[in-house]
Amino acid sequence: MAAGARRVIPYHRLTESLALLPHAPGVYQMLDADGQILYIGKAISLRNRVRSYFQERAALGPRKEAMVARVVDVRTIVVQNEVEALILEAQLIQRHQPPYNVRLRDDKRYPYLKVTNEHFPRIVYTRTILDDGARYFGPYTNSDALRELIDLLRSVFPIRTCREPIDGQRKRPCLQYHIKRCLAPCVGYQTEADYDAIVADVVLFLEGRQEALLTRMEQEMHAASARMQYEAAARLRDRIASVQRVTQKQHVIWPTQIDLDLIALARAQGQACVQVFLVRAGKLFAQEHFLLDGVSDHTDAEIYAEFFPQFYQGGRLPKEILVAALPTDARLLEQWLSQRKQQRVRVLVPQRGERKRYLNLVQQNAEHNLKNFLSHQEAQESASATSLAELAAALDLPGPPRRIECYDISNIQGTNPVASMVVFQDARPKKSEYRRFAIHYERGPNDFAMMAETLRRRLRYLRPDDASEIVAPARRERFHQRPDLLLIDGGKGQLHAVVEVLKELDLWGIPVAGLAKEHEWLFVPDRSEPIVLPPNSAGLHCVMRIRDEAHRFAITFHRKRRAKAMTSSALDEIEGIGPERRKRLLKAFGSLKAIAQAQVGEIAAIKGMNETVAARVYAALRKKGDHSE
């Protein structure tokens, strides 16, 4: 926008929203004409902050100028104070991923370790933080590493993995007890106090306080030995050895038993990487790096300010956080962190000495990781461009197909049929736009009819004259973009079915191709001979990868539907078993197989059951099991 130009409010609803903004702290969300959230921010005074975006000569960078030009409405949420606004802002950014906010790249995929808030807590893998009283540790950038950590914890600490309620009703322990992975609190072999002590040890381990953990376990081991409880002492001895094996690789980098985090930022080519070193009790406990989106027109201080609330939602907080630049709203961040820790937390910029030296080391790691990412991104973009160009040439497309949608059908002899839709943007999966379809066609196995139904349900929301527009506003989020290429898993039959749907909906302008598995040949309309790409073709590898992803997605959904149908039908056939009893049985035993292995008394003990109905369940499921064998 030219200097001195007047900013024009583009929509009357926005004028009304700006006029009604309250003088109160809270969070605001800026929306475009499609209802998409463009930006989420917090403010001490919502009225003053939001209206400042639309004043003449407001000091906005080019990126925010472009954003403001798209805003047609503003939604606000009033809260009690600044700290509540800070927390709510971070939660909403994580949930909605607005394009103009600084946010953790692919943040929805970052996993956390959760210690559940229930009687006899469990250790679970999760990607969602809830306000449920549980303890969360993370985020972790490597999901495989987190799963390995959870396996390690379960091997060292006998924590239950089942969801079965611990109510004293179970008569015998499961396999986890016999392989020494659980001490069977479900049958009364372990008290809740003893179990909670082990959970406390897990939390100490996750917080990086292994020295305190080892000291306490050694004391408990000697006490158990003195009481001649040799089996308990041996278990503690083995647990101590396991913890020592894990912690012996940690490096001492601080001369004192200090807890602090060192955070540094590297920027290049419009990208940013934040490196975090977590020091616990003077040892380097963990290190993670996070790539950020939406950093254009943001200073380092602003990036730190938006990173902190997104990162510090789980895990143990340190006493000090060292950064290269003091975040904006540093006082507010310290207040929030101190409230969470219930102890003062300081955010500092070291100027000299050991702290400055170690922060420089963290900075070097951030620069190295960003350089690696940019190199990988450049190579990936080059390979994607090559594969899409080859595909466009082979299929005679007007240009490289940036958005490819691929469809696959999965069923067994027509039962529980499903379809998958996967989306690849610039040859990379866009999983947020994947869709699954439960097929309504019920007249036996007919992949052609099922494929036609799927495409009809997807494409009917596009206008014939301009397929980028949406007919039904409710589908705006799901089907709002026109594909550059429809890729069908199948040969001429499936392709013909899709072509008929395109003609029916007057959408013939959308390119379509079928990929036959037998020879990996491509088929296109109005051409009898297949298109055969060379085996080493980047374009062929691209469509095969997309097809395989659609197949995986369809198979996964089909297995879930089939398993649910099998469970439901087996119980529904039994007289006296309705939806509520079925739900309680599955919740108590966990699976149909476990119910089939239970005794009549165990089934009858479930709330709402009686001996008569339990006997029917026992007989029916045992009979079905014998027949299947």
Image: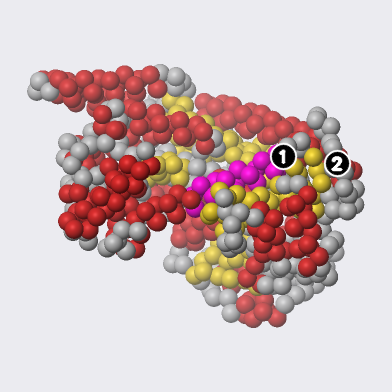
Count neighbours of disc 2 (C-alpha within 10 A) and say few if under 14, some if 14 to 19, many if 20 or more.
some
Disc 1: which residue: 517
Q: Quadrant of residue 125?
A: top left
- Left or right placement of residue 418 versus residue 250 in this view: right
Mark 1–mark 2 distance (CA, rounded to whole Å): 13 Å
For label 2, the residue is 531
State the mark number for residue 93: none
- What amino acid does circle 2 point to? Ile
Amino acid type at mark 1 = Lys
Along the viewing direction, whichever of 200 and 500 lies nearer the viewer: 500
Residue at position x 82%, y 46% in the image? 523
Per the picture, the main secondary structure of the magenta-coloured stretch is: helix
- Residue in front for this viewpoint, 395 or 104: 395
- In this rendered view, identify the residue nearer to me: 568 or 74: 568
* Category of crowding for the residue at label 1, using alpha-carbon neighbours closer than 10 angstroms: few (below 14), some (14–19), many (at least 20): few
Image coordinates of residue 165 in percent, x first then y, are: 26, 49
Q: How many marks?
A: 2
Q: Which residues are magenta?
A: 544-561
> Which quadrant of the figure has residue 194?
top left
- Quarter of the image containing the N terminus? bottom right
